[in-house]
Amino acid sequence: MAANTIIQFFQEVRTELGKVTWPAKDDFIGSVIVTFILVTFFAVYLGLLDVCFSMLARFVFRWYGG
């Protein structure tokens, strides 16, 4: 009984995936490029913030830390 349920599930999944409208190759590549650029930008931005706050914390602890 469980095997029939699993088989039916995958048959329904295949049917539903056939109904999906997939993006064109150019749209897909454009989305990947935009995503890569944004991820890189935010990684650099957050890295710089981390460096700045680390320097600030180091300064504060040296100045007031004793």
Image (tube, rainbow, N blue to C red):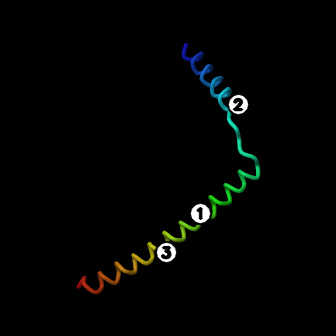
How far apart in space, not on screen, are marks 3 and 2 (Cα)?
45 Å
Q: Which labelled disc corresponds to residue 28?
A: none
Check the image and report above or below for 59 versus 25: below
The image shows residue 18 at horizontal and vertical percentages of 70, 31
Check whether the beta carbons of the residues at disc 3 and disc 1 lie within 8 A of each other: no
Circle nearer the viewer, 3 or 2: 2
Going by the picture, which residue comes out furthest to the right?
Answer: 25
Q: Which labelled disc corresponds to residue 18?
A: 2
Q: Secondary structure at mark 3?
A: helix
**Residue plotted at (60% across, 23% down):** 9
- Mark 3 is surrounded, within 10 Å at the Cα level, by few (under 14), some (14 to 19) or many (20 or more) other residues, namely few
How far apart in space, not on screen, are marks 3 and 1 (Cα)?
15 Å
N-terminal of the two: label 3 or label 2?
A: 2
The answer to which quarter of the image holds residue 37 is: bottom right
Q: Secondary structure at mark 1?
A: helix
Check whether the beta carbons of the residues at disc 3 and disc 2 lie within 8 A of each other: no
Q: Quadrant of the C terminus?
A: bottom left
**Residue plotted at (63% across, 61% down):** 36
The image shows residue 19 at horizontal and vertical percentages of 69, 31
Check the image and report above or below for 37 versus 59: above
- Mark 1 is surrounded, within 10 Å at the Cα level, by few (under 14), some (14 to 19) or many (20 or more) other residues, namely few
Q: Which labelled disc corresponds to residue 48?
A: 3
The answer to which quarter of the image holds residue 58 is: bottom left
**Residue plotted at (58% across, 62% down):** 39
**Residue plotted at (71% across, 45% down):** 23
